[in-house]
Amino acid sequence: MKKYKVGVVGCGGIACGKHLPAHRRNSETEVVAFCDIIEERAINTAKEFGTADAKTYTDYREMLKDKSLDIVLVLTPNNMHCEITVAALNAGKHVICEKPMAMNYAEAKKMLEARDKSGKILTIGYQNRYRSDALYAKKLAEKNYFGDIYYAEAHAVRRRGVPTWGVFIDKEKQGGGPLIDIGTHALDLTLFIMNNYEPAYCVGKTFHKLNKQRNTGNSGGDWDVDKFTAEDSAFGFVVMKNGAVIYLKSSWALNIADYNEACAVLCGDKAGVDLRNKMKLNTILEGKQVIVEPDLNGGQILFYEGGGTAPEDYELAVFLRAVAGEGELYVTADQAAVVTRILEGIYESDRTGKPFYFDGGERR
């Protein structure tokens, strides 16, 4: 059986903690090329996850010259997603790019254009869609269990969970803070279950309230206040073209006791679902208010046989089926581009102090 040859650009935490373990558990791929601007990190990652003859690079352009590569993983800071993804697609490689898709919608469109021109497969790393609760909620939504979903909350709130490693708190390299980092997961999950990708306008506000504090009690240790240039919290209210609304909450540091992330609450005219903590369905049964807590331990929705059962294993398996022409992507780049567009709209609304209209118009 042919194994897909994989190259990875960016050998940091998301590579070693999510993507590369999934590839190690998958029998259809072998990671043969590792690129990182820190040579030692590329070498060490290759030793842990690569083939015996794996090559290492400090320049992704050199890696892309390898005609044997089938797939490239783009796992860099956000400001390099577009540039490397476009180059990889133009070089004839299929691409998995980590979330968020891009720094802004203009970059996302360049990635879509490169995908269309190359004819290659491009997906974005929104692995939370593959969780058992998300899959179950999606199946219910497809069967119209919730009816018309007109109100939703996208939750990505930490009490003290600022990522103090890498460049997460650097606005220039990441494009923002918790909104673009973890808010993107919550928004993607919400849009996915709603199956609604047509925003009309949004209002947003960001805060820099805690990022200059010291002795923070942060789970990852105190942050460097001089390097923390991104927001510490951001909130957005999005109105969709069909009238549905989404309240997006994102924070790395907020004085709140009820914190959770990568989850959503959705309310339809027939029923609702709450994905915070343990999944709960709420509806009316014989004139009584009923809350149902589904047992998600059995009857898992499996996309393939073999490998692991973590969301990233399903993510990789679905991607490989699409590359083989045997199935459809579960996370399309077109959907991910809408997520980026909304995030950009929230930031722009905060910058101008006005609602941001996605059709380009301004209403008073």
Image (tube, rainbow, N blue to C red):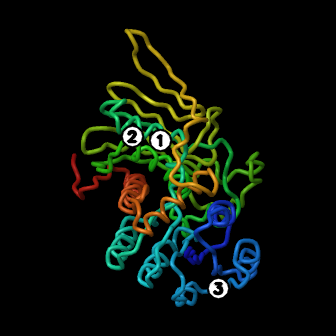
Name the front one of labels 3 and 1.
Answer: 3
Give amino acid for label 3.
Answer: Thr
Q: Which residue is mark 2?
A: 246
Instruction: Determine whether, in the image, residue 126 is placed left or right of residue 342.
Output: right
In this view, the residue in front, 94 or 339, is 94
Give amino acid for label 1.
Answer: Ala
Give amino acid for label 2.
Answer: Ile
Q: In the figure, 246 relative to 355: above or below?
A: above
- 3D distance between C-alphas at marks 1 and 2: 7 Å
SS at circle 2: strand
Instruction: Determine whether, in the image, residue 187 is placed left or right of residue 11.
Output: left
Q: Quadrant of the N terminus?
A: bottom right
Q: Which residue is mark 3?
A: 58
Instruction: Of the two numbered discs 3 and 1 on the same chain, state the one appearing first in sequence.
Output: 3
Q: In the figure, 312 relative to 159: above or below?
A: below
Instruction: Of the two numbered discs 2 and 3 on the same chain, state the one appearing first in sequence.
Output: 3
- 3D distance between C-alphas at marks 2 and 3: 42 Å
The answer to the question of whether label 1 and label 2 lie on touching residues, with beta carbons closer than 8 A, is yes
Q: Which residue is mark 1?
A: 154
- What is the crowding at mark 2: few (fewer than 14 residues within 10 Å), some, or many (at least 20)? many
In this view, the residue in front, 310 or 191, is 310
Location of residue 321 in the rendering, given as x and y in whole percent from the top left corner: 46, 63
In this view, the residue in front, 25 or 223, is 25
Location of residue 91 in the rendering, given as x and y in whole percent from the top left corner: 45, 85
Location of residue 74 in the rendering, given as x and y in whole percent from the top left corner: 54, 72
Residue 121 falls in image quadrant: bottom left
Instruction: Of the two numbered discs 1 and 2 on the same chain, state the one appearing first in sequence.
Output: 1
